[in-house]
Image (cartoon, rainbow, N blue to C red):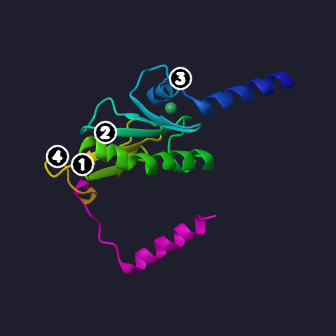
Amino acid sequence: MILYSSLILIIVDMTQQQQQDCILCKIALKKIPAHIIIENDKAMAFLDAYPLSKGHTLIIPKSHYSKIQELDEDSSQSLFNILWKITNPVEKASGVNSSTLAIHNGKEAGQEIPHVHIHIIPRNRRDGAGPVHSMFKNKPNISSYEMSSIVEEIKKSLT
Ligand SMILES: [Zn+2]
């Protein structure tokens, strides 16, 4: 019985760390080559293999987490520390002054690989992409009363 529960613990631990069929886990484990820029204990940055512009970079936690809110605090700090550190070097090396920083957080938000990844997409005036507001074709009308209710609901869940 003790052995059986240890086995379950090991399996649970493995699925939380890495998923076998996840391409970003494979890159984190160096099973798939990538143009790696920087890494620390918990996160790494590398060039997107299907770039939207020159220098398009991805930053990922090394462990498998589907969404931002699932990250442990250490992984979150490591991830955003790399973002903070490399955004300027990525822009400079790409010869631009701007970039779009994007996270698709969940399937309905356009996340195609269910492993957290932050895009740094170097931008210029001729790239054909607009501001994030141009993504939304059906903008809702939300009253001030509804906005206050949403704030209250969010605050209730904050710990
Ligand atoms: Zn993964």
Residue located 54% across and 34% down the image: 62
Q: Nearer the viewer, residue 148 or 101?
A: 101
Queried whether the magenta region covers residue 50, the answer comes back as no
- Tag 1: Cα neighbours inside 10 Å, few (<14), some, or many (≥20)? some
| Foreground disc of the pair 2, 1 | 1
Disc 2 marks which amino acid?
His
Q: Give the mark nearest the N terminus, 3 or 1.
A: 3
Estimate the x, y position of residue 109 in percent, counting from the top left.
37, 48
Residue linked to disc 4: 127
Q: Residue at x 49, y 50 (%)?
A: 80
- N-terminal of the pair, mark 3 or mark 2, is 3
Image marks 3 and 2: residues in contact by CB distance under 8 Å: no
The quadrant of the rendering that contains the C terminus is bottom right
SS label for mark 1: loop
Where disc 2 sits, the SS reads: loop
Residue at 86% in and 25% down: 2
**Label 1 sits on residue:** 96
Q: Nearer the N terminus, badge 3 or badge 4?
A: 3
Estimate how packed mark 2 is, as few (under 14), some (14 to 19) or many (20 or more) residues with alpha carbons within 10 Å. Answer: many
Percent of width and height locating residue 92: 30, 46
Secondary structure under tag 3 reads loop
How far apart are labels 2 and 4 at the CA level? 13 Å
Q: Is residue 3 left or right of residue 79?
A: right
Q: Are marks 3 and 1 in contact (CB under 8 Å)?
A: no
The residue depicted at 38 percent of the width and 48 percent of the height is 87
- Is residue 156 a member of the stretch shown in magenta? yes
Q: CA distance from mark 3 to mark 4?
A: 35 Å
Whether residue 119 is visible: yes
What segment carries the magenta color? 134-159
